Image (spheres, coloured by chain):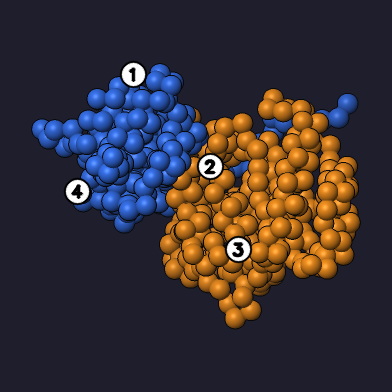
Amino acid sequence: MTETHVSRPRRVATPPLSEPSAWHEIELEVNGEAIRAQVESRLLLVDFLRHRLGLTGTHVGCEQGSCGACTVLIDGQASRSCLAFAVQLDGASIRTVESLAPAGAPLNDLQRAFHEEHGLQCGFCTPGFLMSLTALEGRDDVDEELVHEHLDGNLCRCTGYQNIKKAACHALLHNTVAVEEAAR
Amino acid sequence: MKPAPFDYLAPTNLEGVLDALASDREVKVLAGGQSLIPVMNLRMGHPEVLVDVSRIEALRGIAVDADGALHVGAGVRQATVLDDVRVRERWPLLTAALSFIGHPQIRSRGTVCGSIAHADSAAELPAAALALGATIVAVSRRGERHICADDFFLAPFTTALDDDELVTEVIFPAAPSGWAFDEFATRRGDFATAGVGVAIDGDADGVRSCRIALFGVAGTAVRCPDAEAALVGTAVDEAAVAAAVATGTAGLHPPDDIHATGAYRVEIAGRLLSTAIATAWERCHD
């Protein structure tokens, strides 16, 4: 009988955590505030935001980049915070959903549109949707197609998407619509 | 799940990366992380060391050289290439391929070189590299080699790279005017059931040269040399397209899986190829 030795240790590895390169000091900006923190290499950005900074608005969904619930802005670009290690973001600027309506401030236009158009039900996916769409703010080439492309990357299991689309278009294209209505 | 512990290095020069890769530990290169991090989160991969190449200024270039070839460095994000006007005008096949990758939220971090080095058989960029005749530049402490895309993809997630080599850039030569790139996926942003890239150089007399790449239908993205040979020298018409599609898909036998039967994938690839050859041929004359 052939022995496969599947249970035999192949080698003895040094525990990586005992090595200094597994811990890092990072400096980054989160919602406009300068943050300095010690992080382990394997700490995902989303867990850094939630567990270390207490910013629990960003949600952990699939942890493999499929669902979009953890979407935040990294240097202005919508990105998955489950597909980035905190240590990679030394020097970066992060925006999370908490920045849209800081404590005490009223909901911003995009959030209000979600409220008015019933663009959420359970709300788990909403922070991701809001941040995917926030990445489009200030761009002058936003049209319905671009809005849809940005919505494609986020999953919602409640709404059936129609009201999310309505809310997004309402908030991001309202100037265009107003112009079209005025022309009529 | 959460990834297993690992050591993280972020050198600011190429030597630092090459030294890490030459060590006897299990080192993986981290660029955008949009394929590697899911694999680590699922604990399908647990490298001992990640060496991040995104801090190296020299790898962040995207340039067109004197011969009209496009150089994309290892640190260049897919979104950057997708938005590049030079690429859109002169390598529209590459732009089209990039537009199919995941979602804007993935392309904002994913890199071109990383996707090619990852070599997923259903990914767009390996097929684009084949269709455009790209060259992969691999560097190690032992030196530099240029690997033709045709020789680069060996098996699923397996390339001609040695353990100590880094893809520093991918070079896309000047592209012919005839091109097409298309794929079918059940949902937008998903990996393709099947896809195709076609580059044709030709004029009224016929096809001078042609490269066809299919993806999602074999262990790697594949070229279709017999179909290409059948088209060269002909003025493309319906019969020529049908013959090329029959030849191009004849040797493909992808296995059945949870997403599609192998036969279905080949059927989809054939339909896409048929349209793509006709489109690329038409664009030769624009």
Amino acid on which the number 2 mark rests in the picture? Gly
Q: Which chain is orange?
A: B
How far apart in space, not on screen, are marks 1 and 4 (Cα)?
30 Å
On the same chain: label 1 and label 2? no
Tally of numbered tags: 4
CB under 8 Å between callouts 3 and 2?
no
CB under 8 Å between callouts 1 and 4?
no
Q: Chain of mark 2?
A: B
Label annotation for residue B91: 3
Mark 2 surroundings within 10 Å by alpha-carbon count, few (fewer than 14), some (14 through 19), many (20 or more) = many
**Helix, strand or loop under label 4:** strand
Q: Which residue is mark 2?
A: B102
On the same chain: label 4 and label 3? no
Label annotation for residue A33: 4
Q: Which residue is mark 1?
A: A122
Q: Residue furthest left?
A: A104
Where does the C terminus of chain B fall, quadrant-wise? Answer: bottom right
Amino acid on which the number 1 mark rests in the picture? Cys
Q: Chain of mark 4?
A: A
Amino acid on which the number 3 mark rests in the picture? Trp
Colour applied to chain A: blue
